[in-house]
Image: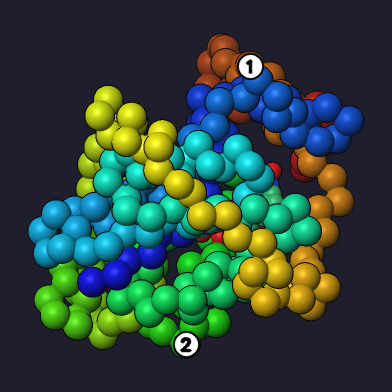
Amino acid sequence: MKILVLMKQTFDTEEEIFLVDGKLKESGVKYVINPYDEYAVEQAILLKEQQGAEVTVVSAGPARAEEALRTAVAVGADNAILIDDESLNGDEYTISKVLAAIAQKESYDLILAGHMSVDDGAAQIGPRVAELLGIPHISTITGLTIDGQTARAEKDVEGDLETIEVQLPALLTAQQGLNEPRYPTLPGIMKAKKKPIERVTAADLGIDVAAIGSKTETLTLNLPQKKSGGRILEGELHEQTAELVNLLRNEAKVV
Ligand SMILES: Cc1cc2nc3c(=O)[nH]c(=O)nc-3n(C[C@H](O)[C@H](O)[C@H](O)COP(=O)(O)OP(=O)(O)OC[C@H]3O[C@@H](n4cnc5c(N)ncnc54)[C@H](O)[C@@H]3O)c2cc1C
């Protein structure tokens, strides 16, 4: 079985976000594999261990994304591809076209991705790539078994469990709870350091960059407004109610 995992490098979720001149401050920031993509990588490695599989991980991003790919190799991925081309830095429309082009280079039985990235968080790439490839897609899976050419996935639906079967090839996106991602071991890290990473550009993929430009434009980035502390009203119930109405009218000006 050949498995492709789509993975994005994102800010560590512990990092504090700063904006400088309206742009994200990226220097001095720790980057990690997008947490939902860790579940996708882990699921691919589990399938490799259980049934035998060749696992390829791919990321479209700046040069620093190589670090995330090496982490995936350290936990067991066999091949890593970095789509390393500044001219491809676009939105979900652009990136899904590029990832679909990569997927079409080989015949993968299974494509795994995170259901969303924790930074841009569009949750679009999985469904878009599946649509471009013309293959079935199941989102936010929390369980998976593969039996021959049949994938049986479980997903949480408002507290109930839904089981969906599709024929491979298919694209599935991972939700928290799918598995427990492992940590890389020291020998794994050492091996990953020596692993050649395949670097691919738009030209290598036969892509006309002008034809897949972003369909969206980010106008501004703003940090959430600082929240002021809550206020506890005191006194008898009728006094609290009167004060609450007063505050809603005269301070919050919402009634
Ligand atoms: C040269 C270059 C520079 C880039 N620089 C940045 C940057 O500085 N900051 C930034 O946030 N993005 C950057 N990108 C990536 C790109 O902007 C986003 O990946 C894309 O817009 C997807 O947006 P999303 O995170 O909302 O995806 P979502 O749809 O939320 O992602 C869902 C899933 O799709 C997969 N996926 C998403 N993006 C990628 C990807 N790039 N590669 C492989 N799999 C992916 C993951 O499995 C992810 O869990 C860069 C891309 C390139 C080519």
**Quadrant occupied by the C terminus:** top right
Above or below for 99 versus 235: below
Q: Quadrant of ligand 1?
A: bottom right
Which quadrant of the figure has residue 244? top right
Label for residue 112? none
Q: Is residue 69 left or right of residue 202?
A: left
Which quadrant of the figure has residue 172? bottom left
Along the viewing direction, whichever of 153 and 69 lies nearer the viewer: 69
Above or below for 226 versus 77: above
Picture coordinates of residue 160, whole percent (x, y): 23, 63
At label 1, the amino acid type is: Gly
Reading the image, the residue beneath label 2 is 134
- Residue 123 seen in this snapshot: yes
Question: CB under 8 Å between callouts 1 and 2?
Answer: no
Above or below for 150 versus 242: below
Residue at image position (76%, 76%) is 208
How busy is the neighbourhood of tag 2: few (under 14 within 10 Å), some, or many (20 plus)?
Answer: few
Picture coordinates of residue 99, whole percent (x, y): 55, 67
